[in-house]
């Protein structure tokens, strides 16, 4: 047997208050959480997770309904554009004489855009792969560089901020104070 409406309302109020406390950064073992009626911090944690999971299920249902509505709209538009995109129509000259038959290329373009939108809506397209390449199209090197290699790169590229170099390079050498010498 399910919970009564009163019990459901009490649980909703308690979860709302718990969620507000958690957003403020209050820990599960705080006395304010205990004052909501939870027997332990783990009970509060489980209750909040149940609430979030239920909300996630509601969101998923709403997304599913929205996706279905959008698919139905796309179906109607595709149905309207399909005949002009797939069946040749008469082409007339200026005097009104039939000079040939061809597809309506604007309708073809519309159909392709509708199909593309449907694929995106339903996640049918494969993810796009991107590859970074290094010099000459080879692999990108992700090795660490020594301080001397960094200095050589800076010398070769030209230094945009020469006043800040000593502090940066001293830190890279392991010197953590600002005087620039190695105190070790």
Image (cartoon, rainbow, N blue to C red):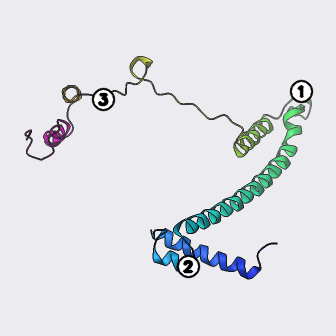
Whether residue 87 is visible: yes
Q: Which residue is mark 2?
A: 36
Q: Position of residue 76 (x, y in %)?
A: 85, 49
Q: Are marks 3 and 1 in contact (CB under 8 Å)?
A: no
59 is within the stretch colored magenta: no
Q: Are marks 2 and 1 in contact (CB under 8 Å)?
A: no
For this rendering, which residue is in front, 130 or 45? 45
Q: Which residue is mark 3?
A: 144
Q: Earlier in the sequence, mark 2 or mark 1?
A: 2
Task: Decide: few, some or many residues near mark 2? Use Cα within 10 Å; few <14, some 14-19, many ≥20.
Answer: some
User: Count of labels shown?
Assistant: 3
Q: Residue furthest bottom?
A: 6
Task: Decide: few, some or many residues near mark 3? Use Cα within 10 Å; few <14, some 14-19, many ≥20.
Answer: few
Question: Mark 2, mark 1: which one is toward the viewer?
Answer: 2
Q: Residues under labels 3 and 1: Cα distance?
A: 70 Å
Question: Mark 3, mark 2: which one is toward the viewer?
Answer: 2
Q: Which residue is mark 1?
A: 99
Question: Mark 3, mark 1: which one is toward the viewer?
Answer: 3
Q: Is residue 30 left or right of residue 16?
A: left
Where are the magenta residues, as a range?
A: 159-184
The quadrant in which the N terminus is found is bottom right
Above or below residue 97? Residue 39 is: below
The quadrant in which the C terminus is found is top left
């Amino acid at each position: 047997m399910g919970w009564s409406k009163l019990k459901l309302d009490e649980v909703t109020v308690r979860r709302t208050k718990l969620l507000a406390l958690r957003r403020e950064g209050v820990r599960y073992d705080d006395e304010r959480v205990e004052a909501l009626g939870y027997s332990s911090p783990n009970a509060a944690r489980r209750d909040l997770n149940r609430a979030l999971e239920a909300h996630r299920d509601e969101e998923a249902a709403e997304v599913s309904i929205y996706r279905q509505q959008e698919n139905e709209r796309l179906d109607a538009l595709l149905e309207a554009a399909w005949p002009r995109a797939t069946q040749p129509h008469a082409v007339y000259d200026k005097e009104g004489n039939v000079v040939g038959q061809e597809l309506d290329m604007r309708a073809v373009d519309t159909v392709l855009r509708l199909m593309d939108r449907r694929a995106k809506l339903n996640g049918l397209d494969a993810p796009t792969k991107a590859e970074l390449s290094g010099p000459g199209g080879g692999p990108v090197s992700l090795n660490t560089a020594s301080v001397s290699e960094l200095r050589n790169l800076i010398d070769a590229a030209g230094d945009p901020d020469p006043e800040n170099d000593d502090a940066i390079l001293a830190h890279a050498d392991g010197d953590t104070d600002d005087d620039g010498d190695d105190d070790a």
